[in-house]
Image (cartoon, rainbow, N blue to C red):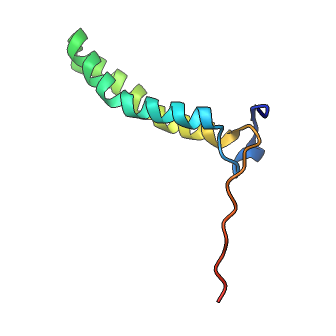
Amino acid sequence: MAKTNLSIDNINKPAPKWYRKSKRVIGLLSGPTVMAVFQVFNLTDKQMANVGVIIAFLPTVLEVFSAILANGEQYAPTEEKQG
């Protein structure tokens, strides 16, 4: 397994497979989790807004992180049609 590193040079490289799978799970579970937290803890409107802002920025933070994280994997080459 290649060594995982963080670098601006990794922008055109895919993030490691383990990270892509983890990010997908987090994304799929974040919505239901927020709703459950609101219901279980009976949060007020102000508290819900604070939690909502944190959850709203989570996908953005994960996308930025995945852009600079790589471990040497490359995208599969594509064949261009000529003609």
Residue in the foreground of this view, choosing between 4 and 9:
4
> Visible in this render: residue 81?
yes
Q: In this view, does 16 lie above or below 74?
A: above
Q: Is 38 on the left or on the right of 80, as rendered?
A: left
Residue drawn at the location 55% of the way across and 40% of the way down: 63
Quadrant of the image occupied by residue 8: top right
Residue drawn at the location 32% of the way across and 22% of the way down: 33
Q: Is 54 on the left or on the right of 37, as rendered?
A: right
Residue 54 in the image, given as x and y percentages of width and height: 42, 26
Quadrant of the image occupied by residue 55: top left
Give the position of the N terminus as an image quadrant: top right
Q: Is 3 on the left or on the right of 19, as rendered?
A: right
Give the position of the C terminus as an image quadrant: bottom right
Instruction: Determine the residue located farthest toward the bottom in the rendered image.
Output: 83
Residue in the foreground of this view, choosing between 50 and 38:
38
Residue 76 in the image, given as x and y percentages of width and height: 67, 56
Residue 41 in the image, given as x and y percentages of width and height: 24, 9
Residue in the foreground of this view, choosing between 74 and 63:
74
Residue in the foreground of this view, choosing between 5 and 78:
78
Give the total number of marks visible in the rendering.
0
> Visible in this render: residue 46?
no
Residue 12 in the image, given as x and y percentages of width and height: 70, 52
